[in-house]
Amino acid sequence: MSGPVLVTGAAGLIGTVLRGGLPEAGWAVRSLDVVPVPEPRPGEEHLVADTTDLAALTEAARGASAVVHLAGIATESDWPAIARTNIDGTYCALEAARRAGVGRVVLASSNHATGYTPRPDGGLLREADAPPRPDTYYGVSKVTMEALGSLYADRYGLDVVCLRIGSAFPEPTTTRHLSTWLSPGDTVRLVDAALRAPSPGFAVVWGVSANTRNWWDVSAGRALGYEPADDAERYAETLIAVHGEPDLTDPVHARVGGEFTTAAYDSEHFDA
């Protein structure tokens, strides 16, 4: 592909990882966020714009080879904020790509799109085994993100890859992360594969590392060329010493969405 990759939400946690890692994988990066990105890399384009501003986002997408859409509220919030930032922002990212003639969009979906799905008793959970069962307004926004991606793939012929990201942190900090961790290195490998896969059409893949305790099947990601290299198990001894072995009957471990399915995430705690 020619042209830079437009990364929205580039000042965030995952955006910062990609700004460092994608150039090493051979991609030029055009960064966009509502705030200036800290410490721009040499040769990196950086723009300040709101992803709900369709005109600004369309202009930012011109000449790009792909859009990686990360911008949005990354946890639960009140409905107006989620609807505007996450749902309207996703529409604008896809529509801006279409108007600017960009043929591929990678969307940062989430495991919370299917958060109430039970952990399988045995084997690994494929994407097809986990239809939409959102656990929060945030989860609803990710279901909508995937639906919009499907629409733009079918109606307009865009290649759209939705990454159902697990727990994308520098390192695991809870025993749940022993199953759900997506390492920084694997984050770059996953996005790189989503950008390079020949004609993926519309795809939904789990975003998780090669964890010994995985409950998600990464076959669909591997079909795109993703080969995870990291395993949270090297943190297991330390985490279990602090927190104990995971109780797999606890909703935090028994459901895909973990703590997002508990009463602490009821809407009354977030609605204005």
Image (cartoon, rainbow, N blue to C red):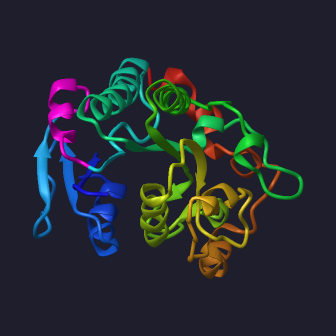
Work out whether residue 178 can be spotted.
Answer: yes
- Residue 228 to residue 9: above or below: below
Q: Nearer the viewer, residue 143 or 246?
A: 143
Left or right: 190 with respect to 131? left
Image quadrant containing the N terminus: bottom left
Q: Where on the picture, by quarter, is residue 224?
A: bottom right
Q: Nearer the viewer, residue 102 or 163?
A: 102
Q: Residue furthest right?
A: 122
Left or right: 51 with respect to 111? left
Q: Where on the picture, by quarter, is residue 223?
A: bottom right
Q: Nearer the viewer, residue 38 or 27?
A: 27
The answer to whether residue 55 is magenta is yes
Q: Residue at x 68, y 73 (%)?
A: 240
Residue 90 in picture, x, y percent from top left: 38, 31
- Residue 93 to residue 205: above or below: above
Q: Where on the picture, by quarter, is residue 181?
A: bottom right
Image quadrant containing the C terminus: top left
Residue 206 in picture, x, y percent from top left: 61, 52
Q: Residue at x 66, y 70 (%)?
A: 211
Residue 166 in picture, x, y percent from top left: 56, 53
Q: Residue at x 30, y 35 (%)?
A: 97
The answer to whether residue 2 is magenta is no
Work out whether residue 36 can be spotted.
Answer: no
Magenta segment, which residues?
50-64
